[in-house]
Structure formats: structure tokens, C-alpha cells
Image (cartoon, grey):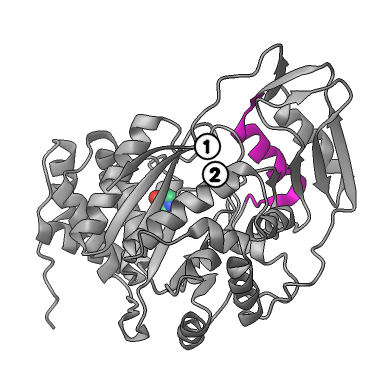
Amino acid sequence: MTTSVEPFDVVDLIRTKRSKEALSTPEIQWLIDAYTRGYVADEQMAALIMAIFLNGMERAEIRDMTLAMIASGETMSFQTLGKTTVDKHSTGGVGDKITLPLAPLVASFGVAVPQLSGRGLGHTGGTLDKLESIPGWQADVSNERMFEILKDVGAVICAAGSGLAPADKKLYALRDITGTVEAIPLIASSIMSKKIAEGTSALVLDVKFGSGAFIQDIDQSRLLARTMVDLGTDAGVTTSALLTDMSIPLGLTIGNALEVRESVETLAGGGPADIRELTVALAREMLTAAGQPDADVEAALDDGRAMDSWRRMIEAQGGDPDAALPVARETHVVTAPRSGFLDKQEALPFGIAAWRLGAGRARKQDPVMATAGIELHAKPGDRVEEGQPLFTLHTDEASRFERALASVEGAWGIGSSAPAARSLVVERIS
Ligand code: URA
């Protein structure tokens, strides 16, 4: 009997990264393949990713890691579609519902937007969880049906199949339990392996910083954006990124059905100013990548074209765009204790409060409450009068209010003057 001989020894690779040296292309290809098939054990991979966490990776190593993770599974191609495809990815935030108005808006210009999305874990909400609050709407779509919807409607937001980058799934689960999630080479290769495997021709990244973001520090977020843009470009995908502020919640709602309502308001030409601003900025970026730099994005929001595209997108996945959205059984209003200017509203505690009300899940298998969340009645800089509602908590279980209120304690404040206005989109990286 012959046994196949492995070309490398994983302990040597761990020593290489421990000594701050670079792994070669064949070493990385072997490592990811051997880990996916179970030859490299979790404890060995854990040691290696901790060495990467501490010592970093060079650009070529990150590219090799990304390509090896893509090669671990299936890849999609939209080349037969006859339309340019553009995708968007956000690193996630509190109240970030931008994909909902953005995908149909961009599709209304004849561009295909295949938006493979996920469910929420922890304080950041998932796009699929939000859309599932629409009666009848289904996240699971076959590849054939996805092509049909892209041809006909132009936009599809659906669950990513489990066949894309399986090495990333295994590695991400390991990072989650070994304190190695926040390593830029690992985050960048994880996100980009899935996005490149999806087969889009262009990609726009919304990379967030601030208290409600995955990475809070602006310089680290900028580095993540740069790394991901380089990875996309190296793989032949037209990629750009916007660096955006996530220190305060986006818009006036946090939570699934509440965020759908606000998205529909935005598609009707209204909605909060920050939601419209970011939707328009990302749509311009996507349409520029698709060869339409002069597209009048705001007109499509104001004249009903984006809304028409949204209705068709929801109907194509079994949803009823006219059905009433579910409403929470219980609400609790917090009012201003004095008059002044709202000068603080921290994203992370509000995100955690919405999660505690039932809008998010602690474990992958947990259900989410469509109705739960927070409605904000004022944003930093707004003048408020004593007794005026500041925010309303929504949930189906009143017992959840206490822990949600504990989360936002000290997270908002009223002062005598308005805080300096902040820019939402601070930088473009291409
Ligand atoms: N999202 C991902 O898909 N991967 C990461 O590593 C972090 C966020």
C-alpha cells in the first residue's frame, strides 16, 4: 500500500510565521488545502493564525491565501448574463440597512446586482434577517432562479450558498474561538475570497470605523480597505472602497422590520438624510465602476424608478411589498430629562440594546424577532425639549426592556450646545 506524501510540514510553516518570515505560494496553497481536508489540525492552524495575527502577512501572502480559499470551493460566473455585475460589501454596523435601498436603486440603471448576504450575529444586523420581516419573502434562491431574477429585475439579495470558500468557513470558526478575528490579513482574505468567488466584475466596499464598527480605529479601517482594494484589483475585479463613520447609528431605526420601513421611505425619495447620503454615495461608486459615472442617482430615488425596482425584487422572491410589516407588542419610550442639544448617541450600546430586545442572535441557530429594535426620534445635533421622546424601544417581550435600557445608560447625552457636525463618508480608496 502506498500513502501520499505531504509536500510540507505544518510545524515548519508555523515556525516561519513565528519568525516573521513570509510563506511561499506553494506553502500557502498546500496549507489551506490540507486544513480544509482535515490533515492540518485545528490546534496547528490556531498556532499559525496567532503568529499571523501578531506578525502580519505580506501583500503576496494575503493574495495567495485569498486565492487558496477561493480554490477550496465552487465559484460563480455571471458572464453569460449580458449585463455588467456590481456587488457591494459593508463591514457591518448599527442600523446599516443600506443594501436594501441600494441594490434596487443601482439595478434601475440596467446593472445587475447579485447581493449574496448573510444573517446577523452579535450587535450588527444581517440583511437577510431584515428582509425576512417582509411577509412571504424567501432568502434561499437556486442559482438558476438567481440568474432569471438578475436578467429580469436586475437585483437579487439572497443567502450565499455553502459551497463558496469552505476553507474560510472553517477558518473563521477557528478565529472566532482563538481571539484572532481582528487580524487585517485574515479579515481581508476572508471577505474577499467570498466576494471574488461570487464572480462579480466590480465591487464597492463600505469599510466602517467608529464604535459601532467591526474595527473601531480609523487607521486600521483604512489599512483594511487598502488591503481589500488591492486584493480585488489583483484578482481582476474593479474594486473601490468608501471609509465611513459608524460612531452613531445609521438612520433612525435599528432592528429588522423597523429598518425595512426606513428603507422603503428612502426608496420613496424620503428617509433620514444620512441613509440617503450613503445610499447615493455608494450607488454613484457602483455605477461609476459599471461605466455609468454620470447616472442621476438622486432622480431615480425621487421619481419612483428605484421603488419600482424594489417592488419587483421583493415579489421575485415571494414577498408582498404591500403587506403590513410586523409591529412589536410592547414599546417603551425614553424622554429627554432636560432641554438642550443631543450631543452623544453611541452606536455600539444602541446596537447591543437592539440585540437584547430580540433583533439579533447570540448563536447562529437562534431565531430573531422581526419586530424588535429601536426607533430614534433625535440625532446628535438636534435640539430637544424636556419631556420630548428621544427613542422608543420595541419588542414582543417586555421583560427585555431592563437589560436594553442598561445597555444605553451613559450612551446618550444632552448638552448646552450642538456637537460639531461629522462627515459620514470620510475617504475614497481605489
Ligand atoms: N466578515 C467576514 O466575512 N470575515 C471576517 O473575517 C470578518 C468579517
Viewport quadrant of the N terminus: bottom left
Q: Nearer the viewer, residue 54 or 188?
A: 188
Q: Residue at x 28, y 63 (%)?
A: 69
Q: Is residue 223 visible?
A: yes
Q: Nearer the viewer, residue 414 or 187?
A: 414
Of callouts 2 and 1, the N-terminal one: 2
Which class describes the residues within 10 Å of circle 2: few (<14), some (14-19), or many (20+)? many
**Helix, strand or loop for the magenta stretch, by majority:** helix
Question: Tag on residue 246?
Answer: 1
x and y, in percent, of residue 351 in the image: 64, 40
Q: Is residue 144 left or right of residue 241?
A: right
Tell me the magenta residue range: 344-362
Residue labelled 1 has its Cβ within 8 Å of some atom of ligand 1? no
x and y, in percent, of residue 282 in the image: 45, 53
Q: Are marks 2 and 1 in contact (CB under 8 Å)?
A: yes
Under mark 1, the amino acid is Met
- Element marked by disc 1: loop
393 in the magenta segment: no
Q: Is residue 83 left or right of residue 115?
A: left
Q: Quadrant of residue 87?
A: bottom left
Q: Is residue 26 left or right of residue 88?
A: left
Residue receiving disc 2? 93
Question: Tag on residue 386?
Answer: none
